Image: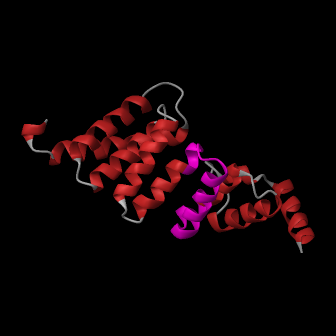
Amino acid sequence: MKLIYLLITLLVLSARPVEAHIGKGKIADPVAEIEYRMLLDFQPKKNDIRNKLGMALYRMKKLQEAKKQFNTVLKNDPANFNATDALGLVMLKQQNAPAAAAQFKKAKALNPADPLVYYHLGQAYIMLEELDKAQKALQTAVQKALLPNQPSAVIAALPAIKKALQNINIHQPSTTR
């Protein structure tokens, strides 16, 4: 049976690499899920593939499955920034803001230069109604996002980060500004 998976995987990969899925939207998440699972059948310790599978599952709202994938990555590599941050996103989506904030703080410690981790942390603080902390995190996200040579995902998120910051500024009492 694994031989059939291998042949299908090789055929699919020869037509277009799985990497085309990330960032370009060329492969639908359900198809990417199948491809990543097949690849993991042969290389179960490949954390980059497992992270991509987890993100595809997250986008498809298969949160428990995504959480399992990210936890597996973190079991293999406790300092994996992508899995740490993504696990926080899952927790945030599950409305578990305290756990999400803790994950984002870990992710921030692993990669303090990443603007999106500050955005994610700001979202957790908003959910926790800690608006001063949210404002600070979002301001940091904007500052870091405006630095040169940011990836397209950061540039694409910048309007949402600015909007979240603007919403906090509107909703905070004038005495705390």
What residue span does the magenta drawing correspond to? 55-83
Q: Nearer the viewer, residue 108 or 25?
A: 108
Percent across and percent down for residue 127 are: 29, 56
Judged from this view, the residue extending furthest toward the bottom is: 1
Q: Is residue 66 magenta?
A: yes
Determine whether, in the image, residue 98 is placed left or right of residue 75. Answer: left
Percent across and percent down for residue 9 are: 84, 62
Percent across and percent down for residue 115 are: 44, 36
At a point 52% along the width and 42% down the height, the residue shown is: 153
At a point 8% along the width and 39% down the height, the residue shown is: 174
Quadrant of the rendered image containing residue 40: bottom right
Residue 160 appearing in the image: no
At a point 88% along the width and 59% down the height, the residue shown is: 10
Quadrant of the rendered image containing residue 35: bottom right
Q: Main secondary structure of the magenta part?
A: helix
Determine whether, in the image, residue 140 is placed left or right of residue 64. Answer: left
